[in-house]
Image: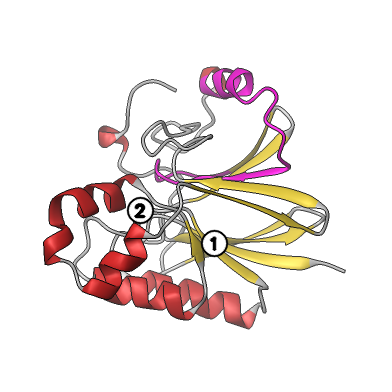
Amino acid sequence: MSTKIGIISDPHATPGPVEEALSIFRQQQVDHILCAGDIAGYGEDLDQTVALLRQSECQAVIGNHESWCLEQMAEELDQATCEYLGGLPSCLEIQVEGRTLYMVHASPPDSLMDGIRLLDEQGRLIEANLNCWAERLQGFAYDLLVVGHTHQVFAQRIAKTLVINPGSTLFNHSCVIVTLPGLQLEWYGLSGLAMRRSWNWGMMATGP
């Protein structure tokens, strides 16, 4: 028996690519849908983006943009949207098909800003950053770690964990389906565009 999990991240208040990803997930008959945060920010249709996630029963975690939005704009938000964002957990732990999965926006245990940045501007692996995170994730006792935040697309084994960043549905034009227990990955481009491995380089932190 196997279980399919559809994963998105960083939709940034832009529902079109999210709707497309959800359509792919329906076609591929996924069993669960996850979103690694940053539902808010940049775009102009947060309410519809939230509605799509709720309708699809997507399990999401809070990102830095949701935190900022709740701190600075809570009175301006639609009540249902505000309640949804306010109820998001900082992390998610699930067990499926004998595999353990941990999801957080930036990095474990619950960081919203300390992102796992593995790729350079051209999407090439930065060995020094990989080695740094291998040290930091020593003892991390999960089979699969799902993160977002850095707007990078990768699936990289670090220490004993497969770390997946599905990339931003908006900026990387990407989503992924992982099949458990075998950890097979299927990547999909969105918006009729090729997946962009690394985006928004200038705004990312310079450290690992």
Q: Residue at x 24, y 55 (%)?
A: 41
Q: Residue at x 81, y 59 (%)?
A: 97
Where disc 1 sits, the SS reads strand
Crowd class of label 1 (few under 14; some 14 to 19; many from 20; radius 10 Å): many
Left-right relation of 14 to 44: right
In front: 182, or 108?
Answer: 108
In front: 123, or 45?
Answer: 45
Q: Does the magenta stretch include residue 150?
A: yes
Q: Residue 38 carries which label?
A: 2
Three-letter amino acid code at the position of disc 1: Leu
Crowd class of label 2 (few under 14; some 14 to 19; many from 20; radius 10 Å): many
Q: Residue 114 carries which label?
A: none
Where disc 2 sits, the SS reads loop
Q: In this view, does 199 lie above or below 182?
A: above
Residue most extreme to the right: 1
Q: Position of residue 52 (x, y in %)?
A: 40, 77
Q: Position of residue 156 (x, y in %)?
A: 64, 38
| Stretch in magenta | 129-154
